[in-house]
Image: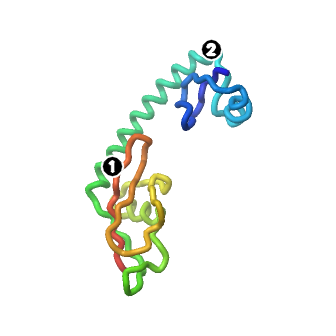
Amino acid sequence: MRIVLHESVSGLGNRGDVVDVADGYARNFLLPKGLGQRATSGVEAQAETMRKAWQAKNAKDREAAEEVAKTLVAKSISIEARAGAEGKLFGSVTANDIVDATLAQTGVELDRKMIILDEPIRATGTHTVTAKPHDEVQFPITVEVVEA
C-alpha cells in the first residue's frame, strides 16, 4: 500500500515522503495513529509541499542545534553535589540536573531527552556527556561535579 507520511517515522521515512508499506502495517499502525494516509494523486501533490516545508524546518533546526553546540562545547558546566570522603556522591547527577545547570550557567535551554547518559554520574570529577539536540548534530558537554 502506498502511504504519504504526515510525521517522520524512524526506519521508514520523513514527513511528506510517499512510501510503500505492507497493508497490515498501514492499517494497524500508520493510519490509526495518524502518521500517514493512503496516497492518491491529490494527496501526493500535497506531500511535495509537506516535504519542502519539512526540509526547510529541518535545516533551520539543524542550524540552531549547531549554534547551541558551538556555545556549549567551549564551556564546562559545574554542578555541586553532596559527596562522601572518597568523592562518591550521595545520590547521582542526572540529565535533569545537567539541563538545569546548563540553563543557569549559559542561558542555553536544552531538553532532558537531548542528554545521552549511559548511567547517572555517581562520582565527583570531570565527566563528558553527549548531547543530541538534532538527529544530525551531536556534541560533547564537559560536566564538572564538585563537592558541595
**Image spot of residue 94 (x, y percent):** 47, 66
Pointer 1 residue: 69
**Image spot of residue 8 (x, y percent):** 55, 34
Q: Amino acid at mark 2?
A: Gly
Query: Which residue is at a point 33% across and 49% down the rendered structure image?
Result: 69
Where on the picture, by quarter, is residue 6? top right
| Residue sitting at the far front | 22
Rendered-image quadrant of the C terminus: bottom left
Where on the picture, by quarter, is residue 129? bottom left
The residues tagged by marks 1 and 2 sit, at their Cα atoms, a distance apart of 41 Å
Secondary structure, mark 2, is helix
**Image spot of residue 103 (x, y percent):** 39, 60
Where on the picture, by quarter, is residue 102? bottom left
Secondary structure, mark 1, is helix
Q: Residues within 10 Å of mark 1 (few under 14, many from 20)?
A: some
Does residue 10 sit above or below 100 in this rendering? above
Q: Is residue 131 left or right of residue 37?
A: left
Q: Residues within 10 Å of mark 2 (few under 14, many from 20)?
A: few
- Marks 1 and 2 close (CB-CB < 8 Å): no
Pointer 2 residue: 42
